[in-house]
Amino acid sequence: MSFSSLPTKVQSLLFLTFLIIYLVTLMGNSLIILVTLADPMLHSPMYFFLRNLSFLEIGFNLVIVPKMLGTLLAWDTTISFLGCATQMYFSFFFGVDECFLLATMAYDRYVAICSPLHYPVIMNQRTRAKLTIVSWFPGFPVATVQTTWLFSFPFCGTNKVNHFFCDSPPVLRLVCADTTLFEIYAIVGTILIVMIPCLLILCSYTRIAAAILKISSAKGRHKAFSTCSSHLLVVSLFYVSLSLTYFRPKSNNSPESKKLLSLSYTVGTPMLNPIIYSLRNNEVKNALGRIFQKALGLRNCIP
């Protein structure tokens, strides 16, 4: 149903807004991937994990936004049973993996600040590969179990999903069977998926804060904090929007308000991540400058 309750003019305005955000998200995250691959100065572990985050954000957007744009223009407000299950599966997959990848990035910042001399040894290619696998793996079992279980229920009555994508709660309302066990599993699973990475991030930043406070010079403290400020901002945006969406009391959780909150982590955060990492990161800005200078230099050399 997306935003069908809104006037047509408002839906058209939303379409243009989300289209611009979608294109900025794809270009911004693609640029982060290309820049961190092209510039040798950005071949450090931090940017390796940042590339993975940008890839996740692109995937998350491709799963949700194109269909939402189509429904806003009323091209096709329907989705097949298999299409709905597929969209739910990959939204779970990318969402869960982002939680764990953000925790991995926090650990990377902890090692970089608390053990700077041992950082290249600890975060070698083998360790990076293992941490990446650990970050990407949880999405598979979580998405498989939750999607398969939910879509094994009988559906009857209305076939209208009151959301802009096939999320678990609005699809669950269409089930005509006892879903108590599934709901308990979903609540416990969501808490664990959100809390475990969140606790790992809090532990990492507690140790980081203690290490930064021990630095005697103000310049040294500022430099140490600046290396993790972008990640801390991204984590805050992601977890605040996710918590407001899934952990609010049901009495305060109307379908329309949940749609607006869901937009923050499905559309807003993926767009802001590359902006935060490019505008607040001098290394990325300098790398962009070098690449543009090289491109202009090659252009001027062409007769």
Image (tube, helix red, strand yellow):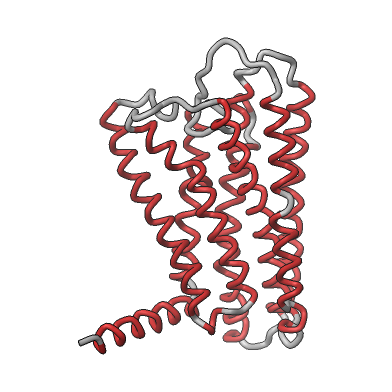
Q: Residue furthest left?
A: 303
Q: Position of residue 281 (x, y in %)?
A: 49, 74
State the residue at coordinates (70%, 20%).
153
Rendered image quadrant of residue 300? bottom left
State the residue at coordinates (29%, 35%).
12
Image quarter of the N terminus? top left
Residue 202 visible in the picture:
yes
State the residue at coordinates (51%, 39%).
261
157 vs 114: above or below:
above
Rendered image quadrant of residue 155? top right
165 on left or right of 108: left
288 on left or right of 226: left
Q: Position of residue 8 (x, y in %)?
A: 28, 27
Residue 209 visible in the picture:
no
Q: Nearer the viewer, residue 260 or 303?
A: 303
145 on left or right of 32: right
156 vs 195: above or below:
above
State the residue at coordinates (74%, 16%).
178
Image quarter of the C terminus? bottom left
Q: Position of residue 137 (x, y in %)?
A: 73, 53
Q: Position of residue 163 (x, y in %)?
A: 50, 29
196 on left or right of 242: right
Q: Residue furthest front?
A: 303
Q: Nearer the viewer, residue 6 or 56?
A: 56
27 vs 159: above or below:
below
- How many marks the image carries: the answer is 0
Rendered image quadrant of residue 192? top right
